[in-house]
Image (spheres, rainbow, N blue to C red):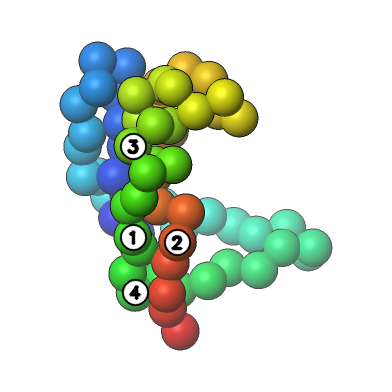
Amino acid sequence: MKAVIAGSSGNTTVTDTPDPSPTPTQVLIDVEAAGVGYVDVMTLRGEYPAFPGRGRCPGWRSSGG
């Protein structure tokens, strides 16, 4: 799968990563598209209180099958 990863210096990188392996209480969703909005930008800057620091993967809104 592809992931957009934000580094500590504020740069972003698109990278190939292995598909996650869900636990018995989780589901795996095939995402076709993901949006980036205000919360994502604040998170990437390390300014969103729920996720302090940088190095997160943005894309809280997604669509897929």
Left or right of 5 in this view: 39: right
User: What residue is shown with label 4?
Assistant: 32
Which residue corresponds to the image point at 35% horizontal and 50% vertical from the top-left? Answer: 37
The reply to whether discs 4 and 1 touch (Cβ–Cβ < 8 Å) is no
User: What residue is shown with label 1?
Assistant: 35
Q: Residue furthest bottom?
A: 65
Which residue corresponds to the image point at 27% horizontal and 50% vertical from the top-left? Answer: 16
Q: CA distance from mark 2 to mark 3?
A: 13 Å
Left or right of 4 in this view: 51: right
* Crowding near the residue tagged with mark 4, few <14, some 14–19, many ≥20 C-alpha atoms within 10 Å: few
**Element marked by disc 1:** strand
The reply to whether discs 2 and 3 touch (Cβ–Cβ < 8 Å) is no
Q: Name the amino acid, label 2.
A: Arg
User: What residue is shown with label 3?
Assistant: 41
Q: CA distance from mark 3 to mark 4?
A: 21 Å
Establish if 16 lies above or below 8: below
Q: CA distance from mark 1 to mark 3?
A: 11 Å
Q: Which label's residue is closer to the chain start, 2 or 1?
A: 1
Q: Name the amino acid, label 3.
A: Val
Q: Is residue 17 in view?
A: no
User: What residue is shown with label 2?
Assistant: 61
Which of 38 and 13 lies nearest the eye of the viewer?
Answer: 38
Which of 41 and 57 lies nearest the eye of the viewer?
Answer: 41
Numbered disc in front, either 3 or 4: 3
